[in-house]
């Protein structure tokens, strides 16, 4: 017996009148008002922000608002090591010294099934969502996809007709 989730929608705008199955867009679940940093932001400000906002990381943008990296809680742990082992002051360190260029982007046109499949193939816990021009639109996390699953849980699955 075949089953399909309730969040499945049909798109009849394709040529030839045939319908193409699409799932709920990630824009329904992604975080849109992201905390971002610049590469010259002091690392102490980053740590304060991560703690106060209860987030684990944020994108780093250049002056043109283009993504140049990520800074997260693990990157910030290097501050302590640098302070202790290299006798470097914490206050004067900036994001550029600690951020990484390890991140993955996904198109704003992706749906929740596309993203779930990507998460299954990688170790990333979050993807940066970009538009057709490469500009940051938001972020989608594994937790966001769990919320999507929760919204279709229980009776939302029905036999395919």
Image (tube, rainbow, N blue to C red):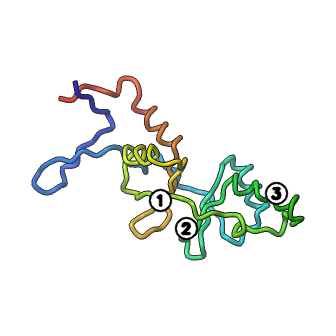
Q: Position of residue 16 (x, y in %)?
A: 10, 54
Badge 3 crowding class, 10 Å Cα cut-off, few under 14, some 14 to 19, many 20 or more, is few
The 10 Å Cα crowd at callout 1, few under 14, some 14 to 19, many 20 or more, is some
Q: Nearer the viewer, mark 1 or mark 3?
A: 3
Q: Is residue 96 above or below residue 8?
A: below
Q: Nearer the viewer, mark 2 or mark 3?
A: 3
Sequence-wise first label, 1 or 3: 3
Q: Are marks 2 and 3 in contact (CB under 8 Å)?
A: no
Which residue was labeled with disc 2?
67
Q: Residue at x 42, y 64 (%)?
A: 131
Q: Residue at x 28, y 32 (%)?
A: 4
User: In the image shown, does 87 or 140 lie closer to the viewer?
Assistant: 87
Residue at mark 1 to residue at mark 2: CA–CA distance: 10 Å
Cβ–Cβ below 8 Å for labels 1 and 2? yes
Which is nearer the N-term, disc 2 or disc 3?
Answer: 2
- Which image quarter is the C terminus in? top left
Q: CA distance from mark 2 to mark 3?
A: 27 Å
Q: Specify the farthest residue to the left.
A: 16
Quarter assignment of residue 113: top left
Residue 147 percent location from the top left of the image: 49, 37
The residue lying at 66 percent from left, 49 percent from top is: 56
Q: Nearer the viewer, residue 140 or 27?
A: 140
Tag 3 residue: 81
Mark identifier at residue 105: 1
Name the element at disc 1.
Answer: strand
């Amino acid at each position: 017996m075949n089953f399909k989730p309730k969040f499945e929608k049909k798109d009849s705008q394709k040529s030839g009148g045939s319908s193409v199955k699409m799932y709920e867009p990630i824009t329904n679940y992604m975080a849109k008002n992201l905390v971002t940093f610049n590469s010259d932001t002091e690392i102490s400000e980053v740590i304060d922000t991560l703690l106060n906002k209860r987030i684990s990381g944020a994108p780093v943008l250049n002056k043109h608002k283009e993504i140049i990296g990520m800074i997260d809680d693990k990157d910030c742990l290097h501050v302590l090591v640098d302070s202790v082992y290299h006798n470097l002051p914490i206050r004067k360190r900036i994001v550029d010294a600690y951020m990484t260029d390890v991140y993955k982007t996904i198109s704003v046109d992706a749906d929740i099934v596309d993203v779930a499949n990507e998460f299954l193939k990688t170790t990333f816990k979050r993807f940066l969502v970009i538009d057709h021009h490469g500009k940051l639109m938001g972020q989608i996390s594994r937790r966001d996809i769990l919320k999507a699953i929760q919204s279709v849980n229980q009776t939302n699955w029905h036999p395919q007709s």
